[in-house]
Each structure stands twice: as C-alpha cells, then as structure tokens.
Amino acid sequence: MGNVKVELPVVCTRGVIVFPNNEIIIDVGRKKSVYALEEAQEHFQSQVMLVAQRDLALEDPRMDDLYEVGTICHIQHIRHMDGYLRVKFKGLERAKISSLEFTDEMVFGSVDPILDVQTDVNEELALVRRIARQLENVEVLNQDLPKDMITKLAEGISATHLADQVAQIFPFSVESKQRILEAADVNDRLLYIIQEMENEKQINELDTLINDKVKQRLDENQREYYLREKLRAIKEELGDVADRESDTEEYRRMIAENPYPEAIKEKALEELSRYEMLPSASGESGVVKTYLDWLLNLPWWQESQDNEDLNRAQEILDEDHYGLEKIKERIMEYLAVKTMTDSLKAPIICLVGPPGVGKTSLSKSVARSLNREFVKISLGGVKDESEIRGHRRTYLGSMPGRIIQGMKKAGTVNPVFLIDEIDKMGADYKGDPSSAMLEVLDPEQNALFSDHYLEEPYDLSKVMFIATANYLDNIPHALRDRLEIIQLSSYTEVEKLEIAKRHLIPKQIKENGLKPAQFKIKDDMISYIIKYYTRESGVRQLERVIAALARKCVLAILKDKKKSITLTKKMIQSYLGKEIFDYGKKEHKDQVGTVTGLAYTSFGGDILQIEVNHFDGKGKLVVTGQLGDVMKESASIAFDYVRANADKYKIDSKMFENQDVHIHVPEGAVPKDGPSAGVTLTTALISSLSNKAVKNDVAMTGEVTLRGNVLPIGGLKEKSMAAHRSGITTIVMPKANIKDLDDIPETVKESITFIPVDHVSQVLNAALVK
Ligand SMILES: Nc1ncnc2c1ncn2[C@@H]1O[C@H](COP(=O)(O)OP(=O)(O)OP(=O)(O)O)[C@@H](O)[C@H]1O
C-alpha cells in the first residue's frame, strides 16, 4: 500500500476508532454502510475506509460531521445477523479524507494514506520502555490485557504496533483515540498513550482513595450508630425501671381507690406482685401487664342511671323510628317491668327481619331511650368458641373474647349490647360458639359468665342484650328457645314514603348542612325514587339515594348560586342516572309455559319466573337454573303428578314418550330453593303441555304433594309485598296459610286478591286463561 490517493467506499462508525495492526468486530446496520461493504467486497478487494463521526447521534452524517482521519480496513469476515451485519475488520493504514461523494446509496471517499514518521530513535526507545513498565503494572490501570499482547511484548514488537494495539485496547475516550490515530509521528503517538495511561492511573488512584474514604466514613457512622444504640438501651433500661415503678404505683392506686369486687382486688394484687418480680425485659412481664390492664379497666361497678320516665322513652323511640309499633310496645313493656321490679330476668329480645328494616338503629334508640351505653358485636362468620370466650392466658397473644371486649368498650356494667347476625354463626371442630352464647344470653347463668382469658367470672346480668337475625330458621334451636322473637317485616311503599319524609330526608338535610327550605321533594317524587331507584325490603338503599340527591343539591346551591331546589323527575334522572329498576316486573302478557312464583329469602320476598318448554325427544325431564336440591325434588314431584293426571288436564299421554320437557328458572339474585315453588312448577308444566296460557297478573306459592294437594308455606307476608311491588293483582296461596293474611298490610290487601286453595286443580282454575 503506497501513499497514493485511493477511492474507497466509506463506512461511518459511532464511537469506534479502528487502529491499524488490529482486528476488530463491529456491528453494521445502517443501509449506506451495508451497501458500502457490498461495494467494497465486489469492487475494492474488500477494502473500506472506516471513519468515526463526531456526533454519535447523526444518522446520515455529512463531511463536516466526520473526523478527517480514519483507517483503511480489510473486511475479514461478515456474518449476517438479524437485521444487521457482524463484520470483522482488520485495520491496515491510517488515511486522511480529502473529499467525499455522497450518493443515495452510499458514501465514497477519496483518501490519502498517512505514512508513519519516525523521528528520534532513542526517544522512541525510552517511550516504549515506559509503556512496557506501565503494562507490567497493569492492575494499576485496572485493565485486562489480552495474553498474547504480553507475549508479543516479550518477543518484541515494533513501536508502531505497540502504540496501535495499546491505543485500541485501552478505554481511552474517542477524542483521545482519534488524536492518537491522527498523529503521524510514532513518538507523538507513544507520548499521547503515556499521557493517557498516566491519566487513567491517576483516575484509578483517585477512585481507590474515594473508596477508602467512603469505607472509613461508613465505619465511623457504624461506630456512632452502635454507641447511640447502646446509649439508648441504657437509657431505656433506666427509664423502664422508672416506668414500671410508676405503672405499679398506678395499679396500686386503682386497686385501692376503686370499688372492685373483692375477688378482683385479690387477683389484681397477686398479679401485681408477680409483675414486680419479673425482669422488665422478659416477655412474661408484658403479658402480665396486658392482663392487669384488662382486669382493672373493665367496668365492674360503673353503672349508668336508667331513664325511668316511660313517656320520655316512648318519645325517643317515636322520634327515631316510624311505625314498628309492636316492637316499640314490647320495649315499653320491658321498661315498665324493669321499673316496677328492678329486675331484668326477662327473655332476651331478638329482632328478626330482612336487611335495612331498622334492627340495628332501633337497638340504638332503645339505648338512647334508656339512657344506656350502646355496644355492638357481630357474630357473622364466628365459628370458634374462643371468639366469644377468649383464649387462655397461656396462649401467645391471647385476648378476652368478644363479649368482654364489648363490655370494656361500653365502660358500664349495664349497656344495651347488640348481638348482630346471630343467625350467621357457624361451628367447627374447635367448638360450637352457640353453647357459649347460651351462657351469655341465659339470665340464670350470665351473672357468672366465664371468659378464658379473664379467669374471674364476670357479671353480665345487668346488660340488656338484643340479638338480631335475618332468618329465623338459621338461629341454633337451643338459642332460639331463650329468645323472644320479634319479627320485623319489609316495609310497604306507603311506609317507605313516610320513613323517607319523617326520618331519612330530615336526616340527610341535617348531615349535608342544608336548611329544610333548601331541599324540597314532593311525595310523588319520593314514590318515584322508591319505585324506580330501589328494590329492597328495608330503606337502606333509599337512604343512600336520598343522601346522593342531597349532595348533588348542595353542589348545585353552591355552584349555581341557587336559593333552594325542588327536585323534579328530570333533575332526579340527571342526578341519579337512568331509572335502575322497572317497576312491576311481572310478565307483560299472558303466556304459555311461563308462571310467576313467589320466593322468600333472607333479603325479603321476591317474585320468580318459571318457564317450561317441550320439544321432540324421549320423555326426558331437564331442569336448569341452578336450583337447590329441594326445588329439584319439587320439580320431579310436579312432573310425576302431571304425568299421572295427564287425562284430567287434557294432555296427550304420548307426549311423555316422544317429547322432552325442559324446566328453567331464569338466573336472578333470588336463591332458588325450598318446596314452595311446587304449585308454580306444576302450573307451568300443565300450561306448556296443554298449550294453555297463564294469566300474567297471577302469582302463586305452595308446596305440592304427589297427589296434588297444596301444603302451607312460610313468608306469605313478604311474598305478597314483593308481588305488590311487581304489579301482581292475584295471589294463589295455600288454604292453611289463611291465618297469615292478618299480618298483611292493608295497602297490599286492597290491591291484591288472595285465592286460598288446597289442591292443584284449584290453582289451575285460577291461573289458566279460560
Ligand atoms: N322505621 C324506620 N324509621 C326510620 N328510619 C328507619 C326505619 N327503619 C330503618 N330505618 C333506617 O334505615 C337504615 C338502615 O337500618 P339498620 O341499619 O338498622 O338496618 P338493619 O335492619 O339493622 O339491617 P341489617 O340486618 O343489614 O343489619 C338506618 O339508617 C335506619 O335509621
């Protein structure tokens, strides 16, 4: 290779400088570079000019963006990778670019090779030796040298070689490398390299220094931390002793000054002396302290004075709740007896009813009317006796049970104590909580209630317990015997309207800082909300909807500077969105094979459609709709009854051989079980198989036997109220339930005709379209 100008394809590199006498692998991706490589292989004996660009970011650099000096390289090898080429270049010669030609495909360069200039040979030798020494001490440079370099060095390589190889390997900056590349004088290159190496070495030394300093600082910090901790521990120990002294003093004072029962005083003193003996750091000491806190802070003698003014009590009950006469009456009786006899050995009241009908809030009112504290625990999901009675103290992290916890919260020995969801209690291998509840609720036993944690008996006899449940049947039998059940039932729309007017709206007006004149809603709009935005037995949803409306009104008053707001249907719709429920969800027209049944669940009453279809088949019965076992049984009883009495109902008996029958109870929130859908299933089957339509405004309930007799059912009141909500006008019901008609609200009775029956044939008479 001479010093004549050559034309070569150019490949621009980013951050890589290739020195002669080196082989290096570079990934090439840019289109122009790839093209240049191809061109080089085809027409330039695989030679290209590699030149670094000054600005790494440029995709398509121009002449000014490139260094003037680069390296003529030979393409040793190309591997095709995914989307780029991995190319091994061998640096041949330094060269200076004199001109570049940019075409669409690639860059061509006219380049002048730079010849090495050798000036002072002695200087060269000195410089080489210096570099060699540096290399021996290479750890200082923090650099892994390729083995063959050391060997080559030992064998002796030329100064140019040495300079190029060291320059290639060492992590000098691109600028420094470029400077070394550009130097024509070999001694200059060597000198630059020594400078760079020195630089590196200094940086490395600095780095070590910094490391040491950091370490030293850390050590100091650690020492300081250790001392601080030690000091804290000592202080704590001293303080602890002082704390303990003041603790014991306080306990002693409590025991001396307060009228605890003698047994409790004794127990407390005993524990206290144990506490003083125990080393403060021991876990045991904490356990004893927690126990003492429980024992001494429970109410033992604190009692609130009952309000004995019965008129005042009645006033308070009426103030808080609309209606509920029966239960209010019962509470008044209770108070009267208590005032007369000063004894509370009456059975415990249990309020049973669907959610949101006011069981909890009524109990709160009872507390208010009696002037007693109010506490509440929920037994929902409680499966373990120890939740009621606590764990023994030997148990790690043990605590008293929920009853004692409730008493501590109450702070008096005679609170109104609400036991919520007594029907949702479970039982497992750890023991049945209901036996513990028996003790709690039995006036004969609860004066000596035993809690495992407390160890001492606790007197619950002054507590007024009230239990609540959604579903009577789920209360354990033994418990049910001790309770005086008071049923609360769903509210009618008229009652809901009154509750909203008298209680819910005034409450929300107050809670949202409004004045009564600012928030107005007429009766027909309240009814509209009840019908189209709620579907419930109680009034909880209604309360939420009214609260939402009140908030919107507050916003409108503040934002739009309105004086007052009278809610219209349009406003309600814009505030609450579209109507959520369609009122009167009964079938729109008389249909064959579709019958409305009535269900009674813990959420109150509801209506439920039963559909029957039949089609060519082999006489199979298919039942779908996720029914419970009892309801499935009713379905097959109904089917057998219909089959046995096909003639009577003018059904072709061949249908039971060449047709399959499908009973479906469509999805819905209603849990589908129980025998009371018997009449509905039978009617739907007969309607479908005899092709006679069923009246859409008739609903029915009743169990059916194989002989077609109709047996009584539960929840007629709730069921009829649900039917009323849905626009049903006739209810077919078992004759044996006639006595329950007394409980049904007048408004319901006014718009619904009840047809008592004792046989399926009467049901069909009433339900099928003639
Ligand atoms: N007759 C009523 N008069 C006034 N407000 C009522 C009446 N019935 C219910 N409410 C109100 O309805 C809301 C819900 O009542 P509450 O929480 O007592 O229901 P609940 O029967 O205890 O329900 P759950 O069984 O779900 O615990 C309360 O804000 C309560 O004040």
Image (spheres, rainbow, N blue to C red):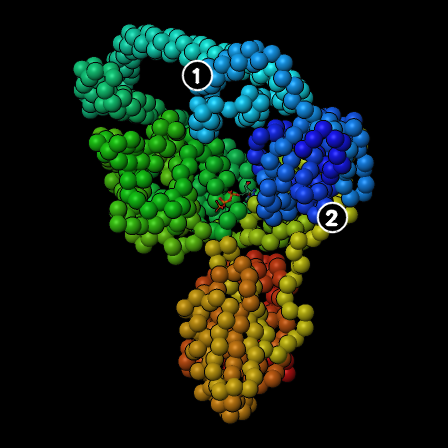
The residue positioned 65% from the left and 30% from the top of the image is 93
Label 1: which residue?
137
Query: Picture quarter containing residue 447?
Result: top left
For badge 2, the amino acid type reads Gln
**Quarter of the picture holding the C terminus:** bottom right
Work out whether residue 696 or residue 282 is closer to the camera in this orientation and state it. Answer: 282
Assign the N terminus to one quadrant of the image: top right
In this image, 448 relative to 99: left or right?
A: left
The quarter of the picture where residue 48 lies is top right
Does any portion of residue 444 appear in the rendered image? yes
Q: CA distance from mark 1 to mark 2?
A: 86 Å
Residue 76 pos. (x, y %): 59, 41
Please state which of the two labelled residues, at mark 1 or mark 2, is closer to the viewer.
1
Give the class, few, some or many, for how many residues have Cα within 10 Å of label 2's Cα (few <14, many ≥20). Answer: some
Give the residue type that dot 1 points to. Asn
For image coordinates 58% across by 30% down, the residue present is 21
Indicate whether 388 appears above or below 692: above
Label 1: element kind? loop
Residue holding disc 2:
573
Dot 2 falls on a residue whose secondary structure is: helix
- Residue 576 shows in this picture: no
> Residue 462: x and y, percent?
33, 33
